[in-house]
Image (spheres, rainbow, N blue to C red):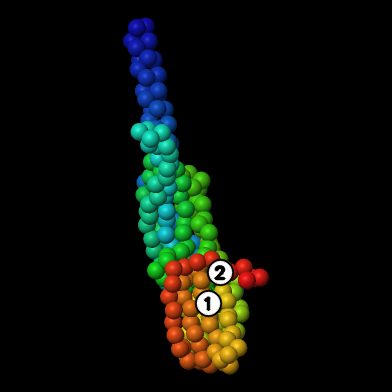
Amino acid sequence: MRRRFGQGIMGALVACLLAAASAVAAAEPPAEVVIHGRIVDAAGKPLAEYPVRLIKTKTTLNLLHFSTGSQQAEVGRTTTDAEGKFELRVQPDPKFDYFYLRFYDPKTFDPVRYAVPADQNITKTFKSKTEVQADAVIRDHPDWAKVSSMVTEYGPDSNRGKILRSMGLPERRQTLPDSPGRENWWYYAKGLCYQLQGDQVLHKRTFDPVLPPRPSA
């Protein structure tokens, strides 16, 4: 009788240990998360060699100054293939609160052609699944249609065309009545002003970036 009782206790103990082990295993994050997707432009055309970055963030607490802040780090990055497809394999990090896909790299992004895309929050799926599907559409800059039309009008190899393609629309085009055919193209936010005579660049002025003047100015 005692033997059967002892065996029962032992069996219950083993069952409890197995249940606890299963609970711990279920609570542990997956060993690897695979993120894949496809990036296209507004017309549905795949964007090849387009950068994809995974960003993680968390809230930090400074007990000395009784203040909070945030910490951000890049987990990994890749680029799309000829079909606009990408794949990232990363290790989960439970120490961080949020995970975002960032389809933007300031070194390679074309801000004249495209609008800066918002980060894509994949936190919920990233923390609970081993596979994340994340597609994105990179929209045109609101001024792109006009810029493209003007570049075609002036010619892509003209000075005006090159300025427009690299800088976008000027925030102000100032004509000079005393000098027919001469005008200033002001890029206030970039701290640049081009003075043009026809297609000739007469002068390029630089200054500290400022807000553009009001329309009534």
Left or right: 52, with 169 as reference point = left
Residue topped by disc 2: 212
Of the numbered discs in the image, which one, if any, rests on residue 186? 1
What label does residue 30 carry, if any? Answer: none
Quadrant that contains the N terminus: top left
Say what amino acid the circle numbered 2 marks.
Answer: Pro
Secondary structure, mark 1, is strand
Query: Which residue is pictured at 39% across the width and 69% down the height?
Result: 107
* 172 over 58 or under it: above or below: below
**Residue 48 makes an appearance in the image:** no
Q: Position of residue 56 (x, y in %)?
A: 42, 50
- Residue drawn at x 45%, y 50% is 99
Task: Please state which of residues 52 and 88 is positioned toward the viewer in this rendering.
Answer: 52
Question: What amino acid does circle 1 point to?
Answer: Trp
* Left-right relation of 211 to 49: right
Between the C-alphas of marks 2 and 1, the distance is: 9 Å
Query: Image height check: is 11 above or below 63?
Result: above
Q: Is residue 71 left or right of residue 110?
A: left
Q: Out of 38 and 156, give the one closest to the viewer.
A: 156
Q: Within the image, what quadrant is residue 139 found in?
A: bottom right
Q: Nearer the viewer, residue 131 or 115?
A: 115
Q: Is residue 109 above or below residue 180?
A: above
